[in-house]
Amino acid sequence: MKETNELIAEFMGAIGTPKYNPTEWDIYITGCLDVDSDDENAKHFYTPEEMKYHTSWDWLMPVVDKIEDIRFDNEDKDSFVSYHRYDVDNRGTQCTITDVQEGKVVGYGDCATKRESTYQAVVEFIKEYNQNK
């Protein structure tokens, strides 16, 4: 999970913080700290082992929101329209992330729970996304 949590953190804009410790990642900008209200978890830095993308909807849903907020522009000769590029579809214990513009699946998960499937699809999506940007 360490590598995949790190992959997600990077997608969300987190960077390693050598000033403090090169194995810690500043994920403050992801908004995940808002859900950690007790003093024990209310810190500004997490190591990849401490990240909860794989166990918490509160961590995972901002990632899904970011994926769904990626847009593409369709320049029609009569109008200019911006569309959502990716669609995240959860059904039962399956999750599919589709590239609407290309019409192809770019992330898929089929696990025991909806959260695990979503996590799996998100990781697959980010690997594909990073490879093609």
Image (cartoon, rainbow, N blue to C red):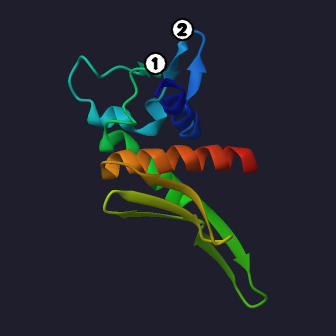
Label 2: element kind: strand
Q: Please report whichever mark, 2 or 1, sits nearer to the chain's N-terminal start.
A: 2
Residue 111 to residue 34: above or below: below
Q: Does residue 45 appear left or right of residue 97 in this picture?
A: left
Q: Are marks 2 and 1 in contact (CB under 8 Å)?
A: yes
Kindly indicate the quadrant of the structure image that contains residue 40: top left
Would you call the spot at circle 2 few (<14 residues within 10 Å), some (14-19), or many (20 or more)?
few
Q: Position of residue 32 (x, y in %)?
A: 37, 36
Q: Position of residue 62 (x, y in %)?
A: 42, 47
Residue at 40% x, 36% y: name it. 53
Residue drawn at the location 28% of the way across and 21% of the way down: 41
Image quadrant in which you'd find residue 80: bottom right
Q: Is residue 133 visible?
A: no
Q: Amino acid at mark 1?
A: Thr
Q: Residue at x 54, y 13 (%)?
A: 23
Disc 2 target residue: 21
- Amino acid marked by disc 2: Asn
How much space separates mark 2 and mark 1, taking CA atoms?
9 Å
Q: Is residue 74 above or below residue 32?
A: below
In the image, residue 68 above or below residue 133: below
Vertical placement of 13 versus 38: above or below? Answer: below
* Residue 5 image position (x, y, % from top left): 48, 31
Q: Residue farthest to the left?
A: 38
Query: What count of labels does the image hold?
Result: 2
Residue 118 visible in the picture: yes
Query: Which of the 4 quarters of the picture holds residue 55?
Result: top left
Seen from the viewer's position, the closer of residues 110 and 38 is: 110
Give the side of residue 41 with respect to residue 76, left or right.
Answer: left
**Along the line of sight, which residue is nearer the eye, 96 or 53?**
96
Q: Closer to the camera: disc 2 or disc 1?
A: 1
The kind of secondary structure element at disc 1 is: loop
| Residue under label 1 | 47
